[in-house]
Image: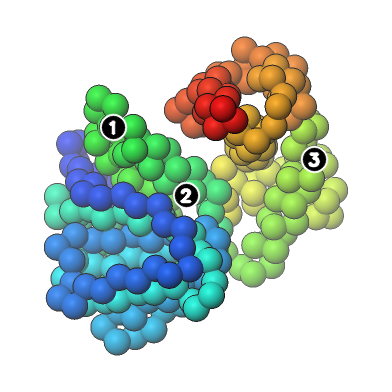
């Protein structure tokens, strides 16, 4: 079944939190007035929702409806990291079946990198609070839910397909500084190049090129913050011979320019 969205429908974001802790605890005895979306990016944490235990680990998301009692905590002595978005879904519930349920929903996502990139950009907007940041956050959240629903509707992605995509991701992560092609990925999984490209997009929601760019930019973010290399040196190191092109890709994926992180690095060192 397909659902359409009316122009102007919005998901009102009411709070956005990035959490990194080994001593996290939260309790909502009567439930929250807003819906809660959680994505774990490192480690594990646990929730009890209507007295049902739900353990979350990296790559798993959790959606808790409003007014549903729950509490959550860190796994003892274990650091975990997660993004948490609270939002009002009343205006758009008819468009998304997951928002029509009174029960919580949880799943692992094959589109982890894509979902994570959306949440990172939302978090950046929420922190900076530049003009129209709420509008952008709500648009990103709506887009994120489209990807989650497509994956939820398909839910038929086989374990074998997921394994093949993980092999391709591993290859890209090891060779992202080079020019990665669908021919190489096809050879990596012993399939045709076109099959490899099609399967990769179906499972991840990204093209091979988009995933390569995202992987390069993650490396660049780390190096801009923690190395002494210049922007041009980092651009060349990760595979962009043209620094101006690197700037454009970096800004498109992060909402920042590389020199923003270099300035942070210099401030920290002082």
Is tag 2's residue or tag 1's residue first in the polypeptide sequence?
2
Is tag 1's residue or tag 3's residue first in the polypeptide sequence?
1
- Could you tell me which residue is drawn at 34 percent across and 81 percent down? 48
Q: Which residue is mark 2?
A: 115
- Tell me how many marks there are: 3
Q: Is residue 243 above or below residue 160?
A: above
Q: Are marks 2 and 1 in contact (CB under 8 Å)?
A: no
Q: Position of residue 17 (x, y in %)?
A: 34, 52
Mark 1 or mark 3, whichever is nearer to me: 1
Is tag 2's residue or tag 3's residue first in the polypeptide sequence?
2
- Could you tell me which residue is drawn at 66 percent across and 15 percent down? 243
Question: Is 189 displayed left or right of 261 in the figure?
Answer: right
- Whether residue 151 is visible here, answered yes or no, is no
Q: Secondary structure at mark 1?
A: loop
Q: Is residue 127 above or below residue 29?
A: above
Question: Is 260 displayed left or right of 132 in the figure?
Answer: right
- Calculate the distance from the C-alpha at mark 2 to the C-alpha at mark 3: 22 Å
Q: Which residue is mark 3?
A: 175
Q: Quadrant of residue 128?
A: top left
Q: Secondary structure at mark 3?
A: helix
- Calculate the distance from the C-alpha at mark 2 to the C-alpha at mark 1: 21 Å
Q: Which residue is mark 1?
A: 129
The quadrant the C terminus occupies is: top right
Q: Position of residue 227 (x, y in %)?
A: 69, 32
Q: Quadrant of residue 159?
A: bottom right
């Amino acid at each position: 079944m397909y659902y359409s969205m009316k122009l102007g429908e919005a998901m009102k974001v009411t709070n956005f939190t990035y959490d990194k802790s080994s001593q996290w605890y939260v309790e909502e005895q009567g439930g929250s007035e807003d819906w809660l979306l959680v994505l774990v990016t490192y480690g594990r944490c646990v929730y009890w929702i209507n007295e049902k235990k739900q353990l979350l680990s990296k790559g798993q998301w959790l959606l808790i409806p409003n007014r549903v009692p729950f509490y959550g905590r860190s796994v003892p002595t274990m650091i975990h990291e997660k993004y948490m978005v609270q939002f009002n879904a009343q205006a758009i519930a008819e468009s998304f079946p997951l928002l029509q349920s009174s029960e919580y929903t949880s799943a692992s996502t094959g589109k982890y990198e894509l979902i994570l990139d959306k949440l990172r950009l939302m978090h950046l907007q929420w922190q900076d609070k530049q003009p129209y940041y709420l509008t952008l956050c709500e648009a990103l959240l709506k887009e994120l839910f489209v990807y989650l629903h497509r994956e939820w509707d398909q839910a038929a992605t086989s374990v074998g397909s997921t394994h093949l995509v993980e092999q391709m991701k591993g290859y890209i992560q090891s060779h992202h500084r080079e020019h990665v092609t669908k021919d190489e990925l096809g050879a990596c999984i012993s399939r045709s190049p076109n099959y490899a490209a099609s399967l990769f997009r179906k499972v991840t929601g990204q093209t091979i090129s988009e995933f390569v760019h995202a992987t390069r930019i993650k490396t660049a973010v780390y190096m801009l913050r923690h190395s002494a290399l210049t922007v041009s040196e980092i651009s060349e190191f990760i595979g962009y011979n043209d620094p101006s092109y690197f700037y454009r890709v970096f800004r498109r994926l992060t909402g920042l320019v590389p020199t923003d992180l270099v300035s942070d690095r210099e401030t920290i060192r002082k």
